[in-house]
Image (spheres, rainbow, N blue to C red):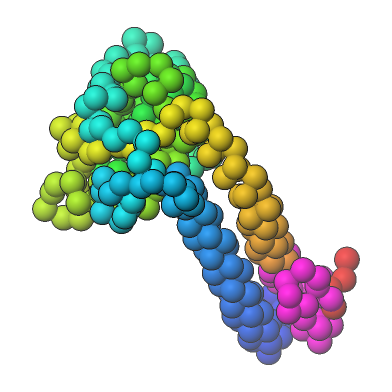
Amino acid sequence: MKSLLPPLVEQQKIVQYLDEKQSEVEKLIKIKNEKVDKLIELKATIIEKYIFGLENKGNTKSGPITGIKSIPSHWEVKRGKYYFKEIDKRSVTGKEELLSVSHINGVVPRSEKKINMFMAESYVGSKLCVPHDIVSNIMWAWAGGIGVSSHSGIVSPSYAVYRMKEDCLFYREYLDMLLRSRAYIAEYNVRSTGIHKSRLRLYSNEFFDIPFIRPPYKEQVEIVNFISEKLAHINILIDSVNNEIAKVKEYFDALVLNMVTGRHKVSEEKGYGQNGNRYVGTRD
């Protein structure tokens, strides 16, 4: 098998050139990631502004948990045990769709996350859940590992699954935003127990003791629709920046391949645009 072996001096030039380009690319990606983080922070601020009724101009009452100073006076507040019950139904075949829960995406099919590691030989005995069930990763709820499922499927036996005691207590999207808000995640953090932070657990008794706010159902729907309109433009911006990051990475990967295979020489390369959107000096 033949291998490419340019002269040592040329190898050194290639390595130096790619090191410089890698540094530039890493700085550019860092800037863009920071922009994404700021947009995500803006999204969280907008969501909490409306799910807690902070724009309400009418009568208010004290908020039920730390971080929420007040809520509209006509909103109901009860502890979780009055709204939810724990479900522990198990899969007989293990063939149902495997779901995962994370602080980023909430409850989603594991296939969408393209994760192949830590796959079990059998999922018999996994917990079943249906749309509108709450799925809580007991060990990571303190970090936001909780959400409301929009899928039927199975989850880890070590997760907790909760179901509304009555229909139409909560609009699914509203409840998901509420559970995954920074204020409620802070509440899980306080109520989780364990020796090390990475091993804290939010057990069912503590979840049921948390006070949950519940606007009238129609109002929950209106809040979600309003928030969705507010976030539409921000989501487009986030997707756009993530696409730019992907293009920068693709450019660098292609550059490395072209340089080490001799398609391009250091003297032929003129760099790329600093905005990360357009590259110059490369040849096909």
Q: Nearer the viewer, residue 63 or 115?
A: 63
Q: Tell me where residue 135 appears, x and y as whole percent.
A: 35, 31
Q: Residue furthest left?
A: 195
Q: Tell me where residue 145 appears, x and y as whole percent.
A: 35, 43
Q: Quadrant of the N terminus?
A: bottom right
Vertical placement of 211 versus 258: above or below?
above
Magenta span: 252-280
The residue sitting at 37% across, 52% down in the picture is 182
User: Image check: 85 left or right of 233?
Assistant: left
Q: Nearer the viewer, residue 169 or 265?
A: 169
Q: Nearer the viewer, residue 70 or 30?
A: 70
Q: Is 83 inside the magenta-drawn segment?
A: no
The residue sitting at 53% across, 65% down in the picture is 38
Q: Tell me where residue 84 appears, x and y as whole percent.
A: 28, 24
Q: Tell me where residue 177 appears, x and y as whole percent.
A: 45, 41
User: Image check: 113 left or right of 168?
Assistant: right
The residue sitting at 34% across, 37% down in the picture is 213
Visible in this render: residue 126? Answer: no
The residue sitting at 39% across, 23% down in the picture is 169
Q: Residue furthest bottom?
A: 9
Quarter-of-image position of residue 215: top left
Q: Residue furthest right?
A: 284
Vertical placement of 66 versus 264: above or below?
above
Visible in this render: residue 130? Answer: yes
Q: Residue furthest front?
A: 59
Q: Is 266 inside the magenta-drawn segment?
A: yes
Q: Quadrant of the C terminus?
A: bottom right
Number of numbered callouts drawn: 0
Quarter-of-image position of residue 90: top left
Vertical placement of 48 versus 16: above or below?
above
